[in-house]
Amino acid sequence: MTKSCREKGVGLIEVMVALVVLMVAAGAIVNMQSNSLVSAHSSGIHFSIDRLSSEMIEFLRSNSSDAAAGLLDLSDSESTVSSNSESIVSSNSESTVSSNSESTVSSTDNEVTNWNDSVAELLPSGEGQISCTPEFCDVTVSWMEEIDGSNRRQFYNTRTRI
């Protein structure tokens, strides 16, 4: 009489197959988490860009008469405000007093400088540019972003009627 022996338990090959399946699943989860972190970082940058652009647009709207008249020079390094054919120039945090009105330049010049400093500080290789015509103002923010393994300059442009 022969008895058939049935083995109970798990064989070595079955354990190895289970480990391979588990490793593939763990690799997919790690990859998904990595992509999630990159997306969260990118979303943070895009949120900062939107906030910075909105801040400058509100500033331009609050000074719309000066911007529409071309009285604001909104360049990176210095800002100019003209009043009665007289220019008041501010570079960085220095202010010049107009001889006719005997008043200092308002925070207009510093606002643009501070905005450009914020763009450079909050964004990787960030740069801001503002240009106005009598009807519209364009606010452009550029930064470096890694896309498909290479750094590329990205641009975000907002146009508003003033």
Image (cartoon, rainbow, N blue to C red):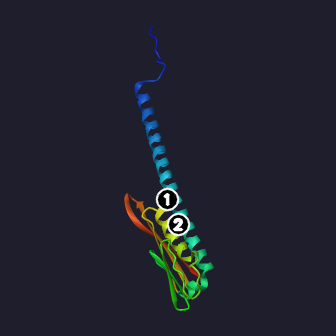
Mark 1 or mark 2, which has the lower sequence index? 1
Disc 1 crowd, CA 10 A, few/some/many (<14, 14-19, 20+): some
Image coordinates for residue 113, horizontal then vertical, percent: 50, 72
Instruction: Look at the picture and state if 159 lies above or below 30.
Output: below
**Circles 1, 2 touching at the beta carbon (< 8 Å):** no
Q: Quadrant of residue 153?
A: bottom left
Q: Which residue is mark 1?
A: 42
Residue 35 x/y as whole percent:
47, 52
Position of residue 60 relative to residue 115, above or below, is below
Which of these two is toward me, 17 or 130?
Answer: 130
Q: Quadrant of the N terminus?
A: top left
Question: Quick one: which residue is furthest to the left in this view?
Answer: 150
Image quarter (top left, top right, bottom left or bottom right) of the C terminus? bottom right
**Front in this rendered view, residue 149 or 10:** 149
Name of the residue lying farthest toward the bottom: 85
Secondary structure beneath dot 1 equals helix
Question: Of residues 96 and 130, which is closer to you in this image?
Answer: 96
The amino acid beneath tag 2 is Ile
Neighbor class of circle 2 (other Cα within 10 Å; few <14, some 14-19, many 20+) is many
Look at label 1 and name its amino acid. Ser
Mark 1 vs mark 2: in front: 2
Provide residue 71's location: percent of width, then percent of height. Answer: 54, 86
- Of residues 60 and 146, the one nearer the viewer is 60
Using the image, determine if residue 160 lies above or below residue 28: below
Q: Circle 2 sits in a helix, a strand or a loop, which is it? A: helix
Q: Position of residue 103 (x, y in %)?
A: 59, 81
Hey, which quadrant is residue 24 in on the image? top left
- The tag on residue 49 is 2
